[in-house]
Image: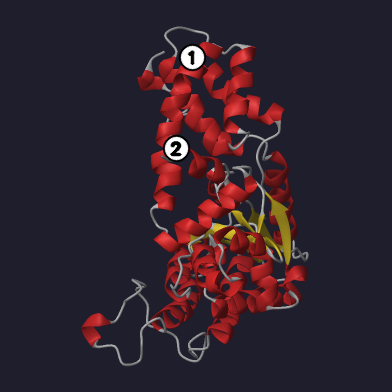
């Protein structure tokens, strides 16, 4: 079929496969927006799951919903070894601009922007030369004595309070969306939890929506023991068969085309129901199909192309980030699980490699920091990427 109008190509279609089957999360967020805007207490939200399940796309959709409700919304992606203050300043600047168009008191908006600028400027090191000092691009004087102490926990509480009060002036709220939240520095995680706790106590209309790997709850609880009371956790997993079929059929039907039931079976078997894989195999099947409808033979012909693309862009790009010692660890995990999406015992990995467990700790910790594995439970380790073990066993 016509590859130019391939509905599975990135950016094509009205709703990507990653959002099929996510109606529960979308509706729950609608309730959060309504409750918070009315001054009722509500916990912030954490989306957790493996890579390829569509957390980032869902996060973007939640941001769009917040904006449609008249909220201010800002989104950031946490990065390892990067402080939160600077990207957070940019995200909240965007949220304040969203609110400013509805606010009737420009002086009040400028006051909050001044506090934000004071917070942002603390990202500069005290001994930084003038030419090296970052400027946040906020065209108001920096406030003094508010969110500028240099202590991220104190400053974040004060900043969130100011921004939330600005949103309350117009009867809405602010949504701060943080992707890859497990990559925040420990002190920033602690500050974020403290700020969310303060907001929950006061009922201020600001919610944090985070997305990250399955061990995010452990990261948060290690920072603040009360974090489990602050957040509502939603596990984002692969799609059930009905939703997976919908993710395939809906974009095809929008192009007035069809797909045979046997082809749907083959696509589900190949993708495992993971949205990222559904898109990859669906795109390849569309390109391989000479005519309408898509058949099981088309899927079979397309599978090697999809697998080749995944091997380079999805699996290979991650494998290349690992050092030789880390790759040895990854391959041992794959061998022990026989390529299945299961956790391996850390002691078993040590036995398999003929090494002492303590000698493997640096490799394991580095793999966790790179987001390639996570601790599924005490004494066990698992891949963050679905089908990664299968990929490793299939390499030459």
Whole-angstrom CA distance, mark 1 to mark 2, is 18 Å
User: Is residue 216 shown to the viewer in this render?
Assistant: yes
Label 2 secondary element: helix
**Residue 323 visible (yes or no):** no
The residue drawn where x is 44% and y is 52% is 318
Coordinates of residue 167 in the picture (x, y in percent): 60, 66
Judge left or right: residue 162 versus residue 194: left
Which residue position is annotated with label 2?
A: 310
* Residue drawn at point x = 36 percent, y = 73 percent: 136
Residue occupying image coordinates x 32% and y 76%? 135
Residue 153 location (% of width, % of height): 58, 83
The residue lying at 67 percent from left, 76 percent from top is 222
Q: Is residue 164 above or below residue 241?
A: below
Between 395 and 87, the one lying in front of the other is 395
Q: Residue furthest front?
A: 354
Work out whether residue 208 or residue 40 is closer to the camera in this orientation and state it.
Answer: 208
Considering the numbered disc 1 on the image, is that residue within a helix, a strand or a loop? helix
Q: Which residue is mark 1?
A: 298
Horizontal placement of 290 versus 211: left or right? left
In the rendered image of this protein, does residue 5 appear above or below residue 93?
Answer: above
In the picture as drawn, the residue positioned furthest to the top comes out as 291
Q: Does residue 331 appear left or right of residue 141 in this picture?
A: right
Which of the image's four quarters has the C terminus?
A: top left
For the rendered model, the colour scheme is secondary structure
Instruction: Please state the horizontal and vertical placement of residue 324, each as a whole percent of the image.
Output: 40, 60
Q: Quadrant of the N terminus?
A: top left
Residue 274, percent across and down?
60, 37
Using residue 206 as the reference point, say whether residue 119 is left or right of it: left
């Amino acid at each position: 079929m016509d590859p130019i109008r391939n509905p599975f190509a990135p950016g094509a279609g009205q709703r990507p496969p990653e959002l099929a089957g996510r109606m529960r999360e979308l509706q729950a967020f609608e309730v959060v927006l309504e409750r918070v805007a009315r001054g009722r207490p509500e916990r912030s939200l954490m989306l957790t799951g493996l890579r390829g399940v569509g957390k980032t796309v869902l996060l973007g959709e939640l941001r769009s919903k917040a904006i449609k409700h008249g909220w201010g919304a800002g989104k950031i992606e946490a990065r390892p070894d990067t402080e939160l203050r600077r990207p957070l300043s940019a995200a909240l600047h965007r949220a304040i601009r969203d609110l400013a168009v509805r606010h009737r008191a420009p002086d009040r908006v400028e006051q909050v922007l001044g506090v934000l600028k004071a917070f942002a400027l603390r990202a500069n090191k005290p001994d930084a030369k003038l030419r090296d000092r970052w400027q946040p691009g906020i065209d108001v004087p920096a406030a003094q004595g508010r969110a500028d102490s240099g202590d991220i926990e104190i400053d974040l509480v004060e900043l969130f309070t100011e921004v939330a009060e600005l949103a309350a002036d117009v009867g809405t709220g602010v949504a701060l969306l943080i992707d890859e939240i497990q990559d925040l520095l420990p002190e920033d995680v602690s500050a974020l939890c403290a700020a969310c706790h303060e907001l929950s106590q006061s009922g201020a209309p600001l919610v944090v929506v985070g997305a990250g790997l399955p061990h995010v709850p452990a990261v948060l609880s290690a920072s603040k023991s009360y974090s489990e009371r602050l957040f509502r956790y939603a596990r984002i997993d692969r799609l059930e068969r009905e939703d997976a079929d919908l993710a395939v059929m809906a974009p095809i039907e929008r192009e007035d085309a069809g797909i045979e039931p046997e082809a749907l079976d083959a696509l589900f078997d190949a993708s495992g129901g993971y949205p990222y894989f559904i898109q990859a195999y669906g795109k390849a099947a569309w390109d391989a199909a000479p005519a309408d409808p898509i058949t099981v033979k088309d899927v079979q012909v397309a599978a090697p192309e999809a697998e080749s693309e995944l091997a380079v862009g999805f699996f290979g790009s991650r494998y290349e980030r690992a050092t030789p010692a880390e790759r040895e660890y990854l391959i041992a995990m794959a061998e022990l699980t026989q390529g299945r999406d299961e956790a391996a015992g850390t002691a078993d990995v040590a036995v398999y490699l003929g090494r002492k467990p303590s000698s493997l700790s640096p490799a394991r910790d580095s793999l966790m920091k790179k987001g390639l594995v996570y601790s599924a439970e005490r004494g066990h380790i698992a891949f963050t990427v679905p089908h990664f073990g299968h990929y490793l066993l299939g390499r030459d």
